[in-house]
Image (spheres, rainbow, N blue to C red):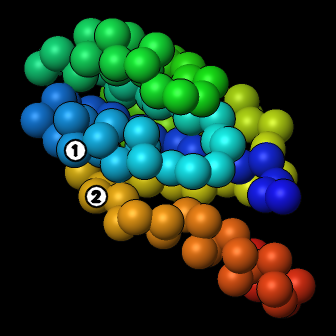
Amino acid sequence: MFPAVDLFVVCHNSHRHLSRLFDGLRTLSIPVTTYFLDNDSRDGTADFLAEHRAKLPFPSYVLRSSKNHGFAAGVNLLARQSSGEFMFLLNPDAVLEPFCLERLLERMQADSAIGM
């Protein structure tokens, strides 16, 4: 059994990348909870996230900021929402390879000296 994993994505004017990211997210075979932060985008990112997060096969949340606080502050904000045993951070332009998260978790669980 896989541990609880929270997946974070901080976005700023990332609309053009999100379709590929969501395609990859839909292929995950383990339960995750996703948290997206729209960091004051002006290109339709927030609307895309609001519309498409409900189509993911696991719990997903969208937080919106009216000011771009930067990447690190965005990650910290999402981390405060987290309740999973592990946090996995993705950039909005990430392309998920099949079973990448599953392999990372399996490897981590095989060696207690490894964390992610």
Q: Is residue 55 left or right of residue 112?
A: left
Q: From the viewer's perspective, is 55 left or right of 4?
A: left
Residue located at (71% from left, 30% from top) = 81
In-front residue for pair 94/72: 94
* Element type where label 1 sits in the image: helix
Q: Is residue 89 visible?
A: yes
What residue is shown with label 2?
Answer: 95
Q: Position of residue 98 (x, y in %)?
A: 40, 64
Work out how far the residue at label 2 is from the one at label 1, CA to CA, in angstroms: 7 Å
Tell me the kind of residue under disc 1. Arg
Where does label 1 land, which residue?
20
Q: Going 55% across and 64% down the picture, which residue do you hit?
A: 101
**Mark 2 touching mark 1, by CB under 8 A?**
yes
Amino acid, disc 2 = Val
Q: Quadrant of residue 88?
A: bottom right
Q: Secondary structure at mark 2?
A: loop
